[in-house]
Amino acid sequence: MSTGSLSSQSVPVFVADQFRATDGANMGDLLSFASELILDDVYELEFGAEPARLSLIARDDASFSIGLDTKIGTPGAVVHLDSALTFMSPDSSINDALLLVEVDELGDVAQVYLLPFTALVSNVEYRLVGIDHETAHTKFAQVACVSFTRGTHITLASGAQCPVEDLKIGDRILTRDDGVQTLRWIGSSTTRAVGEFAPIRIAAGTLNNSEDLLVSPDHRLFIYQRTDELGAGRAELLVKARHLVNGTTVKVSEGGFVDYFQLLFDSHQIIYAEGIAAESMLIDSRTRPVLPHDLSERLGRHVPGHSDLPHAGLDVNEGLLKRPDAADLLKKASGR
């Protein structure tokens, strides 16, 4: 029941024929790749259109392949990150999005996808005000990075609890697999808590966490099952926070702004946040763009402890978690 890849990520996308130009030079045309787009054109989302989940697996050349568990697209096909787009709605709110292009075996365009960072709705005019080729990978990395929110308590080597924003490079952190490890880098960013950037709130006690835990949507929590309540077929599991949302004890926390922090070690680690096990940052082609240039150059293309995917194969298939009592079952399975 594993996804089979530590680097896979599922993102909500619209396909090109759901987002059409209704005014401007390209009026009547479907959304296309950046070289064919024209600033100031107005686009509208097709009535009733809903995003579908596109599963992406990182490749070494900064492109992606489509995962087997995708809800849209052709599994195995290559996807390129084309550009970052900015739309303005009539109320002057800004809507950022990424443009992704799926290609076939001959390299021809098979499909164009729009990955919005905020919710898009039908019958609203979205004016294209920005096309950026330079920041697309960095913006995608901000979505791909697993992050803790300000105020999250991290367990130090001493057992003391330290708010993530107070950690410093060189601090010694308790890990599940490798004892005490040194914190090598800390990233931070502030963003609007909407769409894919809205954190997931796991209420205190839900997974035996001591306080509410707020993490980025694709942040994976480590669960050791003493009894296989989910039917995953193994004891050690990695579960994405967004797959546990049930509207009660696990919720999407939208609204306002959120401060996110990324914690990097020499290898991908399972550390302790609010008393429960959660992953640290993984370096791959998706997340590398958030690193400072000098650090990225120093680490090189392949980083032992990251590129060898030390926790591969532990991801739980989303289908096993599509039930309102998933979090309750995981708490029961842990036997604590």
Image (cartoon, grey):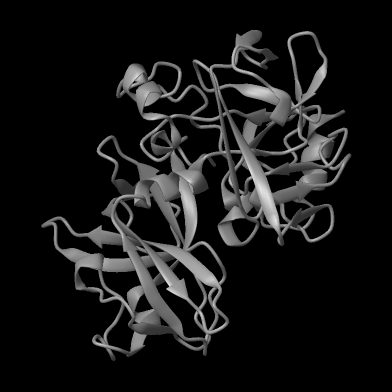
Which residue is at the front of the view, 181 or 86? 86
Residue 108 quadrant: bottom left
Would you say residue 141 is visible in this rendering?
yes
Residue 46 quadrant: bottom left
**75 left or right of 170 in image:** left
Residue 257's place in the image compared with 238, above or below, is below
Q: Position of residue 292 (x, y in %)?
A: 42, 29
Residue 81's place in the image compared with 223, above or below, is below
Which quarter of the rendered picture does the N terminus lie within?
Answer: top right
**328 left or right of 48 in image:** right
Residue 280's place in the image compared with 138, above or below, is above
Residue furthest to the front: 92
Which quarter of the rendered picture does the C terminus lie within?
Answer: top right
Instruction: Please report the residue visible at 54 percent of the width from the left and 77 percent of the height from the top.
Output: 92
Instruction: Please report the residue visible at 58 percent of the width from the left and 82 percent of the height from the top.
Output: 91
Q: Position of residue 272 (x, y in %)?
A: 73, 24
Q: Position of residue 244 (x, y in %)?
A: 71, 50
Residue 334 quadrant: top right
Residue 89's place in the image compared with 197, above or below, is below
Please give the count of numbered marks on the rendered protein.
Answer: 0
**118 left or right of 107 in image:** right
Residue furthest to the left: 106
Instruction: Please report the residue visible at 47 percent of the width from the left and 86 percent of the height from the top.
Output: 125
**26 left or right of 153 in image:** left
Q: Position of residue 287 (x, y in %)?
A: 43, 37
Would you say residue 178 is visible in this rendering?
no
Which residue is at the front of the view, 132 or 184? 132
Instruction: Please report the residue visible at 44 percent of the width from the left and 25 percent of the height from the top.
Output: 309
